[in-house]
Image: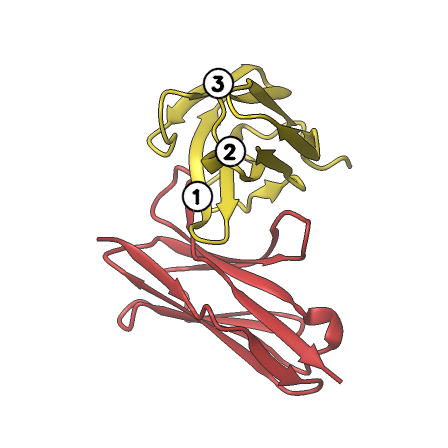
Amino acid sequence: DAGVIQSPRHEVTEMGQEVTLRCKPISGHDYLFWYRQTMMRGLELLIYFNNNVPIDDSGMPEDRFSAKMPNASFSTLKIQPSEPRDSAVYFCASSSDYSNQPQHFGDGTRLSIL
Amino acid sequence: SQKIEQNSEALNIQEGKTATLTCNYTNYSPAYLQWYRQDPGRGPVFLLLIRENEKEKRKERLKVTFDTTLKQSLFHITASQPADSATYLCALGTGTASKLTFGTGTRLQVTL
């Protein structure tokens, strides 16, 4: 079975540019999560969706960040405008709609903002 | 404030020994706790889940304990191998919403 697929794997762009990260969750999973990982702060939850509806976006750092899930097989995380402090690895994960289920992670997008 | 603490120092052990990693938490009432393994350049991979009413869980060479009085989970790898070298993350779940809060991880290095 295909796992969670993220694209691109690496993104290098200049400050001020718009960045769009993409995620395809595992088919049949009802939850989708976006995380950011840095050395200083570890793995932080940004936002998560249930059945394509955003449930908790309290981790989104500021208005420059937005996430959408137009259908069950696709989600985007957008940063506009990007800043150097947004440099991190961004992970997408999905899980099934049962209590206590493990999350399945993609291999992340390494984002560098110059 | 809520806090999840894992030893930020790398743990170096010799092959064949038992590795023990610690996860401490404050100001949480977790319903369950999960452990994940992360290799460089990869996403975390689920290993084990333990619920608040369970004291211990085992899977092959892995063992997890959960003490809600001490607010601590211990993760053991017996007969460790160089292939066990990775960063190990604990994550707390507080309800049925599937939302997890992760610790910062402990890097394990197993040497020959």
Chain B painted colour: red
Which residue in the structure is indicated by mark 2?
A34
Q: Amino acid at mark 3?
A: Gln
Colour approach in the figure? by chain
The tag earlier along the polypeptide, 3 or 2, is 2
Do dots 2 and 1 share one subunit? yes
Q: Residue furthest top?
A: A70
Q: Position of residue A42 (x, y in %)?
A: 46, 51
Displayed quadrant of residue B54: bottom left
Q: Which chain is yellow?
A: A
Displayed quadrant of residue A91: top right
Which residue in the structure is indicated by mark 3?
A80
Chain identity of mark 1? A
Residue B98 seen: no
Which residue in the structure is indicated by mark 1?
A44
Q: Residues within 10 Å of mark 2 (few under 14, many from 20)?
A: many
